[in-house]
Image: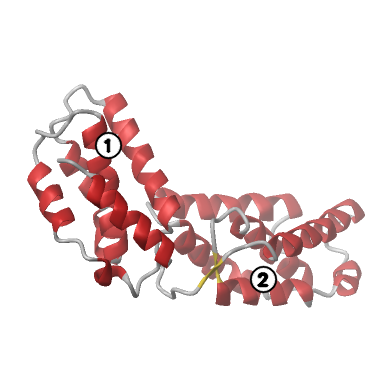
Amino acid sequence: MEFSYQEYNEYINETYMEFKDEKMSNKEAIARTYNEYDMVAKKSETDKGIVYIELAEILITHLKAMYTFKSYIENVLIELDFNLIKLENAISQEEYNDLFSRRVHVLQEFKKMPLDYYQTGCWYYEELIGEVQKYISNFIEENKNTETIVTDVLQRFERDCKNTKSEKYIIYTTLAENLCNQGLITVNGIEEIKNELQSFQVCDISNEQLTEDEQEKLANRIKKVKL
């Protein structure tokens, strides 16, 4: 084993959080983390078990799971050879028992997870709303001058606005709602937000990551925005 049992768990989670700190969605961050540890997992059955169970534990915290990614990890966990892990004798009996118990838990949780069939790395509807809300709240709390709020928020989420139209409209809508709620409808950039939302059509996002229900929710939110 390249790392100890505890180190593996810590390093994999730290790697995931580093990708999150680079402003990635959960879906992209877990995919990038998998790429970082895929070769390490091939060193032994013990390495494989620790890496894939830790990845699975991160995945079950997400709102959805990409169906191909979830299916692959699930199959790896089902086929894990715990007799071989015991023979490799790389972890203690206590760690072996813990690893076995963790596998049982994540396999149970996998059965409950909603699936995502959109192949592109992207944000999920509620996930992105929460991320934008948090950023706006922090901005208002830290800045007395809110005149640049539109520019600042759009710069923070510039990459995501270019990723899919769904993400762009979620970001613009959430920003617009917050501007209305805070009485900030005369700040710089308000016309850009207004023009973008006026151009919205559901057909523009019909083939992207949002479900029909989420598309309808977004459309209704846009209709209610009064800038």
Query: Where does residue 143 sit, x and y in percent of width and height?
Result: 23, 25
Tell me: residue 223, above or below residue 39.
Answer: above
Task: Tell me which amino acid carries mark 1.
Answer: Asn
| Residue bearing the label numbered 1 | 178
Ranked by sequence position, the earlier of labels 1 and 2 is: 2
Residue plotted at (24% across, 70% down): 204
Horizontal side of 47 relative to 29 (left or right) equals right
Tell me: residue 122, above or below residue 76.
Answer: above
Q: Report the label total.
A: 2
| Residue bearing the label numbered 2 | 41
Residue 185 falls in image quadrant = top left
Query: Where does residue 78 sit, x and y in percent of width and height?
Result: 78, 74
Residue 97 falls in image quadrant = bottom right
Horizontal side of 185 relative to 160 (left or right) equals left
Residue 79 falls in image quadrant = bottom right
Identify the image's colour scheme: rainbow, by chain, secondary structure or one colour: secondary structure
Gap between marks 1 and 2 measured at Cα: 44 Å
Query: Where does residue 181 sit, x and y in percent of width and height?
Result: 26, 31
Residue plotted at (25% across, 51% down): 222
* Residue 32 visible to the viewer: yes
Task: Tell me which amino acid carries mark 2.
Answer: Ala
Front-most of residues 219 and 15: 219
Residue plotted at (34% across, 39% down): 135
Figure quadrant of the C terminus: top left
Figure quadrant of the N terminus: bottom right
Q: Nearer the viewer, mark 1 or mark 2?
A: 1
Front-most of residues 209 and 83: 209
Query: Where does residue 216 sit, x and y in percent of width and height?
Result: 35, 60
Horizontal side of 48 relative to 28 (left or right) equals right
* Residue 43 visible to the viewer: no
Front-most of residues 150 and 225: 225
